[in-house]
Amino acid sequence: MRIFGIEAIHPKHRTTVPAPGHKIYPYLLRNVPIIRSNQVWSTDITYIPLEIETAFCARALKSALARAVPEIHNSDQGSQFTSNEYAGILEANKIQISMDGRGRCLDNIFVERLWRTVKYEDIYLKHYCTMQETYEGLQNYFPFYNQKRRHQSLNYKTPEIVYHG
């Protein structure tokens, strides 16, 4: 396998790194039942060997907030989420900020599971080489994931059907 460059699909190195001086917020979701749409938004960045910057995350957040506003926003302690730019957008919209405990992937298990699924069903199989390829591939994958792929954890419904109830 080594000679042919073949390796098993597996999680890579830890990539969440808080930036010095950025504020870390407490985890607000322990024992909180999540019972309605937009009660909590949870986010994460998964490692794909492409550069993802704070400005990109801030633009994505602003775009999402144009559609709906959560009560609580949960993320890990990555530098993109602890930045003044990103946290400032949340604070300006009066959204409570929650952050997973350091090394506590189970605090954000649903998003961790999403990224695992995206990687195993799309990214690892297609081996995107450029940002454009990755963008186009994920533009095709996410409508499938949200509108067509039935989820066992959602009683075999799609996320779109559950969201719109």
Image (spheres, rainbow, N blue to C red):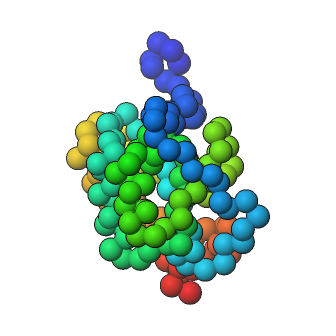
Residue in front for this viewpoint, 127 or 77 = 77
Q: In this orientation, does residue 50 appear? A: yes
Name, please, the residue furthest toward the left: 132
Placement of 86 over or under 53, stated as above or below = below
Picture quadrant of residue 31:
bottom right
Placement of 157 over or under 143, stated as above or below = below
Picture quadrant of residue 162:
bottom right
Residue 150 in the image, given as x and y percentages of width and height: 57, 70
Residue in front for this viewpoint, 35 or 158 = 35
Q: In this orientation, does residue 123 appear? A: no
Q: Is residue 84 left or right of residue 154?
A: left
Residue at 50% x, 44% y: name it: 23
Residue 66 in the image, given as x and y percentages of width and height: 33, 74
Q: Is residue 123 left or right of residue 12?
A: left
Residue 88 in the image, given as x and y percentages of width and height: 38, 57
Residue at 42% x, 62% y: name it: 90
* Quadrant of image for the C terminus: bottom right
Residue at 42% x, 54% y: name it: 87
Residue at 33% x, 36% y: name it: 50
Name, please, the residue furthest toward the right: 31
Picture quadrant of residue 152:
bottom right
Residue 2 in the image, given as x and y percentages of width and height: 51, 15
